[in-house]
Amino acid sequence: MKVLVVGGGGREHAIVEALGRAPSVTEVLCTPGNPGMARQARLIRGDQSPASVTALALAEQADLVIVGPEAPLAAGVIDALQGAGIPAFGPTQAAARIEGDKVWSKAFMLRHGVPTAGHRSFAELDTALAYAGSQPLPLVVKDAGLRAGKGVTIAHTHAEAHAALHAIFEVPQAQAVIEEFMVGQEVTVLAFCDGERAVMMPPAQDHKTIFAGDVGPMTGGMGVICPFPVSDADLRRVQTGILDVTLRGMRQEGYPYVGVLYAGLMLTAGGPKVVEFNARFGDPEAEAVLPLLDSDLAEIALACVRSDLSADQVRFRDEASAVIVLAAPGYPAQPQTGIPLHLPTPGAGEQIFQAGTALHAGQLVSSGGRVLAVQACAPTLNAALGRAYRLADAALFAGAQLRRDIGARIGAVPDPAPDPVS
Ligand code: GLY
């Protein structure tokens, strides 16, 4: 099978790597891709508009297209590919609204009884400011549109809530969602979906603020542990009370959901509740979860597109995985680019997924906010963290930012390096 991947970040690098291990795959293409994938995929320059991606898939006679990022999904790339008769893994534009329009998404959850935080939506700044000022703290303020994971503020003062609302409403036609703050462990459950069935991947935990201790501005994600321990009872609630209900609701409303559904959840005292849905693999969750996949990603994606996914097709290795993100100085506000990168050679069970990188005159340099996602697998989480941190230290670049507390929320501690064999 010839598979075209759309996107150019760490998530797409992990998708390309998983396809490289898939027995059914004969060739992987990626547009635009990044230098880290060049050995595993043929990279093709181009934009990610529905028309360009469809023209490329037709010209290359791709058997399957897998779309990584949210923006092309929201722009209707799957609809365009379907229109041209090309099997395409991802939600249609209408179904991708579950991520792209948080006002619609919250209303959908209420209509179908999906457990989520209490909220109100606003299309006007003044009413939003008045409501925020009357609510107990902390308070969650969300931009209703796509903001690359950075449109959320946890406001600990009313002044912070007001500042976040002013920033959101600087954009014409903006809408805001104000939610109650939920207490508990946050966990990401990704699921392969074929319109009717949702098959869960192992739960993962991202770390979204830039600084250790969960402080500082929100980022796209700074590190992941997987699997995150979730009780069997809670996993059953996620399957039946969240994923199955959501897929049924999407079908009933006329937008069957095909692709990866990202359920960002809070494990509250009252059970798991949805923080947000996304319409794609998480980034950097994909970089932690996909290395554990033991079955053929292309076959799974094709089964989703054909609406005949079975749980037996989706197998993960019984190991732990950890990802440490190395971000550029200045990220998330103003990442510095052009910093030379010198990467070590990863060992077995380790990967350096490239995200914001580029080649300038033969030198690999930083070109974005999150630059590298350094990943390791091991039999235990502490061992995976130890390996991932050692590899991250070897890959450090000038001014790199990384969090040293990935996994600390559940008491995980990176194992020290084994004694050298004498
Ligand atoms: N890691 C958060 C996201 O992918 O949205």
Image (spheres, grey):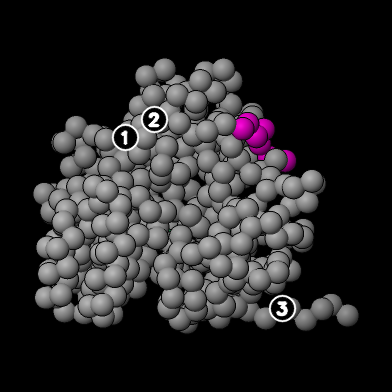
Q: Which mark is residue 93?
A: 1
- The percent position of residue 36, horizontal first and vertical second, equals 68, 47
- Judged from the image, the secondary structure of the residue bearing numbered disc 2 is helix
Between disc 3 and disc 1, the foreground one is 1
| Residue 390 location, quadrant | bottom right
- Judged from the image, the secondary structure of the residue bearing numbered disc 1 is loop
- Mark 1, Cα crowd under 10 Å, few <14 / some 14-19 / many 20+, is many
The amino acid pointed to by label 1 is Gln
Residue 269 relative to residue 204: left or right: left
Residue at x-position 56% and y-position 67%:
330
Name above or below for residue 262 compared with residue 185.
above
- Front residue of 295/264: it is 264
Residue at x-position 49% and y-position 76%:
211
The answer to whether residue 298 shows anywhere in this view is no
Contact between marks 3 and 1 (CB within 8 A): the answer is no
Residue at x-position 67% and y-position 81%:
416
Which sits earlier in the primary sequence, circle 2 or circle 3? 2
Residue at x-position 70% and y-position 69%:
398
Whether ligand 1 has any atom under 8 Å from the Cβ at mark 2 is answered as: no
- Image: magenta residue range: 39-45
The answer to whether residue 337 shows anywhere in this view is yes
Name above or below for residue 238 compared with residue 24.
below
Whether ligand 1 has any atom under 8 Å from the Cβ at mark 3 is answered as: no
Residue 384 relative to residue 96: left or right: right
The amino acid pointed to by label 2 is Ile
Q: Residue under label 3, please give it.
A: 417
- Tell me the CA gap for discs 3 and 1: 47 Å
- Mark 3, Cα crowd under 10 Å, few <14 / some 14-19 / many 20+, is few
Q: Residue under label 2, please give it.
A: 78
